[in-house]
């Protein structure tokens, strides 16, 4: 499976941002203020506005209207709105950090889907699952945020292929 290419969010980016903010609020134990901002609005060293209490795994969640995915023999690189690039190494099992926030990350293939799981120090978990649907012109991104009490919220995003990789 090759996810390489340019992808555009099928739905309105602001609506998706609100859906993700609500999912984070419902799972992180904190109910205040805006959480995620589009990548091109990011202002601080933590890749956007973040909070320092409650579950913090959401600091590892990127959001964008446009994705550019490059896939190599050992990793997937996802550029969100040309502002932030995430690298997911196949079979990784490592510590990741954003500023002072540290989490454990594992990722790898589950059949034809690529799955990334990030667990913060407070027990909040972020799972991202990427797979192609239909004839391969739709990238589905399933985001699951799981609270410390194991309640979870799922957000599914669909991206349409703009162009395959060259």
Image (cartoon, rainbow, N blue to C red):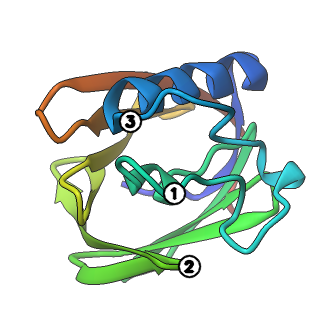
User: How far is the residue under mark 3 from the one under mark 2?
Assistant: 22 Å
Q: Label 2: few (<14), some or many (≥20) within 10 Å?
A: few
Q: x%, y% of residue 54?
A: 37, 47
Q: In this view, does 143 lie to the left or right of 42?
A: left
Quick one: label 3, few (<14), some, or many (20+) residues within 10 Å?
many
- Total marks placed: 3
Instruction: Give me the disc on residue 99.
Output: 2
Residue 123 placement, left or right of 45: left
Spatial distance from mark 1 to mark 3, Cα to Cα?
Answer: 14 Å
The answer to whether residue 115 of the structure is visible from this angle is yes
Q: Earlier in the sequence, mark 1 or mark 3?
A: 1
Relative height, residue 2 to residue 103 (above, below): above
Q: Name the residue under label 3.
A: 143
Residue plotted at (74% across, 42% down): 37
CB under 8 Å between discs 2 and 1: yes
Q: Which mark is residue 111?
A: none
The image's mark for residue 59 is: 1
Residue 46 in which image quadrant: bottom right
């Amino acid at each position: 499976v090759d996810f390489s290419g340019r992808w555009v969010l099928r739905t309105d980016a602001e609506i998706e941002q609100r859906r993700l903010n609500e999912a984070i609020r419902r799972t992180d134990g904190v109910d205040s203020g805006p959480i995620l901002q589009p990548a091109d609005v990011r202002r601080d060293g933590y890749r956007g506005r973040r909070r320092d209490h409650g579950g913090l795994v959401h600091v590892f969640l990127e959001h964008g209207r446009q994705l550019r995915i490059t896939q190599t023999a050992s990793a997937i690189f996802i550029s969100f709105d040309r502002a932030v690039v995430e690298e997911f190494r196949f079979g990784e099992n490592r510590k990741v950090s954003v500023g002072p926030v540290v989490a454990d990350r594992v990722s790898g293939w589950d059949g034809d889907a690529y799955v990334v799981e990030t667990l913060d120090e407070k027990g909040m978990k972020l799972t991202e699952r990427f797979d192609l649907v239909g004839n391969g012109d739709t990238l589905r991104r399933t985001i699951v945020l799981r609270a410390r009490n194991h309640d979870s919220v799922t957000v599914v995003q669909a991206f349409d292929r703009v162009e395959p990789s060259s």
